Image (cartoon, rainbow, N blue to C red):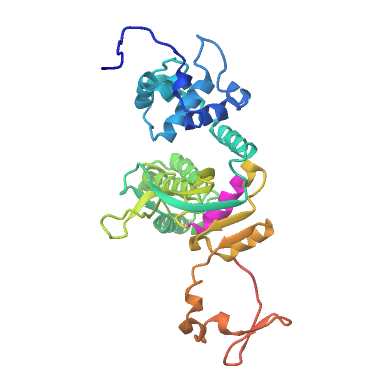
Amino acid sequence: MYKEYIMDQLSLPMDLQEDIPQNHLVRIVNDAVDRLNMNLFTKAYPGGGRDSYHPKMLTKIIIYAYTQRIYSSRQIAKAVRENIMFMWLAARQRPDFRTINRFRSERMKDVLESIFTAVLQFLVECKYVKLEHYFVDGTKIEANANRYTFVWGKAVVKHKMRLQEKVQSLFATIEEAEKQEDHALSGLDLSELGKPADMTSEKLEQAVQQLEQRLEAKPKDKPLKKTVRIIRKDLLPRLQKYESQQNILGSRNSFSKTDPDATFMRMKEDHMRNGQLKPGYNVQIGTENQFILGYSVHQRPTDTRCLKPHLEKVKHALGALPGTIIADAGYGGEENYAYLEQENVEAIVKYATYHRENTKAWQQDVGRLDNWTYLAAEDRWLCPAGQQLLFRRESK
């Protein structure tokens, strides 16, 4: 009537592999990691202490966990104890969550790029990808940072300039007072400080040291004592702070105080519909045949300026760029087109005004340069009014 069901009786086979389909994803992960050279992990294990879990085993269970959208170290450790796929990859070993977290955050941190590149080479060798068509797109990910701890580049420049002007005015007052008393300024002239824009915290430090030397000779000079105190306690620390903020900013226009690497940008998920800027990153991902072949994280809000550095990273990882690059209009730009042409790559990258240029209103607009007459032999444009535009310079 019923099939035999006895839980306490030993049954064969006991090999977990027998219960895993031949084309299952876990077998691909296992095969890919087994192909990795052990030299990738050698630097992460200096030796000493008791034996460690095998790095390939830990790498397998972490990669397979990510494919199953399991990211928590505790959940991965739980799966290793309960899930047959994880049990097979771990050969029934049971690393705890601390071991898994330490491996991926410390030991695996420096070899992650090398592992990713090695897996890509495996995909190419096995013909999973052919590096013919590379589809690239970007998405913005909000940083785990306070959205109200922003620092704006323009504000830093403005405050720094005001502070520099205040310092210059302060030294000018001292110099004028010294001239009235017919005393030398001990070599501290405004010419040494330069223009306000040239003043740095190092120059200000040298100047205040000279003032302190003068103060030792005239300890009862209250104006001089007040000036030294203001510079030491207020102006110099603020100038150092502004310089530090400019170093963090680099070519960006903003950053978050709680996550200095994050830049404020508009996110796709705008629930309040007010265009609020939030700290985040612009992540670029390229795929072929549903495999991710390249990824890069950028601090630039727009995709246009991310294409070239992204493809340079892909070129470094793969040794060459794929034959054809496909991207949306967000990447359309003359600089990107010139780069792809220089790399001898076929580009299927639409520019922003592609559809509008085909409208009748656009084609009849005499203010558009595209509707003017170009004289190739003389390298000049002729507008509808008969005026000539000559070439002057190129710029980015």
Residue 46 higher or lower than 230, as above or below: above
Quadrant of image for the N terminus: top left
Q: Residue furthest top?
A: 9
Residue 210 higher or lower than 194, as above or below: above
Residue 298 appears at what percent x and percent y?
A: 49, 49
Q: Residue at x 57, y 80 (%)?
A: 370
Residue 68 appears at what percent x and percent y?
A: 40, 34
Residue 51 can be seen, yes or no: yes
The foreground one among 269 and 49 is 269
Residue 89 higher or lower than 112, as above or below: above
Q: Going by the image, does 271 lie left or right of 25?
A: left
What residue range appears in magenta? 303-314
Q: Going by the image, does 192 lie left or right of 100?
A: right
The foreground one among 348 and 364 is 348
Q: Residue furthest front?
A: 1
* Residue 45 among magenta residues: no
Quadrant of image for the C terminus: bottom right
